[in-house]
Image (cartoon, rainbow, N blue to C red):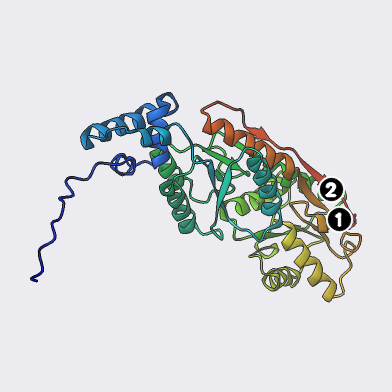
């Protein structure tokens, strides 16, 4: 028998979806959901764009869409510069536990301190659809915030740099913390102080170094170019940077490091060179990692409550998702004085 043609049904025009509305309005799908269910939680300009997109596309709210609009994604995006830094690990572990207790899961993106990767990560999380975003570091605030503002995405900063641009934050004051380190060294008699800065954390690293230089200037001292070096997280690179400082005609009697990892590398280099710590050179860190308190290390460092920071960041995220105002949280820092510093 000859093959008979198979009848086909015309698909007809495709019904616009919530995702279509989100694309037309240049926002995340979760923002459209929020606008449909709780328009009072969406800013006026964004709500206007979504309303216009709905009208232009002829979007009809069906029961499935209404169910979506009345719920949340129960997911928070996290943008972190590094997952190998112990302080980020501590902070995120507390934050994750607080979120899990609220049945909220995390989507974590690590940027390796790359500005382009930061923007890409934020854009990806917005497009994917999350309820809010936690930023633990901001190197490109203009572009990052432009994306978040366009999507009307709730955001919280957990850290220090960038909080002047993000009203909802939980963090400490880098500038005051570094000044307390210099004050300690000045008080015990140091006058020639070197600095080993973290070159990965571009803005945050510079803030810590500039805070040291600022305090030295106030004390009538300076920070010569030869006593300032920059390094990434690699121990060999950090040791080489400290070695360059030590080759100066007048080496420092104290070294201020931008974080504990750099300080530990400096201690290792000093040990290999037969230098006495703190007799030949005093060394300080920043972060208060647990290892710094080991009796064989005994590093003077700045410590903040990463537990309080993670917990308060979680509370701020929940407030942001619910559209509630919440005051930023300034977490105090403490200078822990140990055997790595003493009078020169």
- The residue depicted at 86 percent of the width and 55 percent of the height is 293
Mark 2 vs mark 1: give the one in front: 1
Q: Position of residue 5 (x, y in %)?
A: 10, 63
Q: Which residue is denoted by mark 2 in the rendering?
A: 336
Quadrant where the N terminus is found in the figure: bottom left
State the separation of the CA atoms marked 2 and 1: 9 Å
CA neighbours of label 2 inside 10 A, class few (<14), some (14 to 19), many (20+) = some
SS at mark 1 in the image: helix
Residue 159 visible in this rendered orientation of the protein: yes
Left or right position of 50 against 41: left
| Nearer to us in this view, 51 or 196 | 51
Q: Position of residue 151 (x, y in %)?
A: 40, 40
| Nearer to us in this view, 252 or 296 | 296
Q: Which residue is denoted by mark 1 in the rendering?
A: 293
Q: Position of residue 57 (x, y in %)?
A: 22, 37
- The residue depicted at 67 percent of the width and 71 percent of the height is 237
Left or right position of 190 against 134: right
Quadrant where the C terminus is found in the figure: bottom right
Q: Are marks 2 and 1 in contact (CB under 8 Å)?
A: yes
Give the residue furthest to the front.
1
């Amino acid at each position: 028998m000859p093959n008979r043609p198979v009848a086909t049904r015309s698909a007809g025009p495709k019904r616009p979806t919530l995702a279509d509305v989100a694309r037309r309005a240049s926002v995340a799908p979760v923002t459209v959901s929020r606008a449909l269910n709780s328009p009072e939680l969406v800013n006026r300009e964004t709500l206007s764009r979504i309303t216009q997109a709905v009208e232009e596309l002829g979007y009809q709210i069906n029961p499935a869409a209404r169910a979506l609009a009345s719920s949340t994604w129960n997911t928070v995006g996290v943008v972190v510069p590094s997952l190998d830094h112990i302080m980020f690990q501590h902070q995120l572990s507390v934050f994750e536990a607080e979120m899990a207790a609220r049945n909220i899961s995390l989507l974590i993106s690590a940027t390796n301190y790359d500005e382009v990767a930061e923007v890409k990560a934020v854009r990806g999380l917005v497009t994917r659809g999350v309820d809010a975003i936690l930023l633990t570091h901001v190197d490109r605030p203009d572009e990052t915030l432009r994306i978040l503002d366009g999507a009307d995405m709730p955001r919280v900063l957990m850290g220090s740099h960038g909080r002047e641009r993000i009203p909802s934050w939980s963090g400490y004051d880098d500038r005051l913390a570094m000044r307390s380190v210099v004050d300690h060294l000045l008080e015990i008699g140091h006058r020639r102080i070197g600095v080993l800065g973290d070159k990965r954390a571009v803005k945050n690293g510079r803030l810590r170094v500039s805070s040291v230089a600022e305090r030295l200037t106030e004390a009538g001292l300076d920070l010569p170019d030869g006593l300032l070096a920059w390094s990434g997280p690699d121990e060999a690179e950090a040791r080489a940077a400290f070695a360059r400082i030590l080759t100066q005609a007048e080496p420092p009697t104290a070294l201020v490091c931008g974080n504990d990892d750099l300080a530990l590398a400096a201690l290792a280099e000093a040990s290999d060179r037969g230098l006495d710590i703190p007799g030949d050179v005093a060394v300080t860190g920043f972060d208060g990692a647990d290892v710094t308190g080991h009796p064989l290390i005994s590093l003077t460092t700045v410590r903040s409550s990463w537990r309080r920071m993670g917990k308060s960041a979680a509370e701020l995220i929940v407030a942001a998702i619910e559209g509630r105002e919440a005051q930023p949280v300034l977490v105090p820092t403490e200078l822990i004085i140990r055997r790595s510093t003493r009078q020169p």
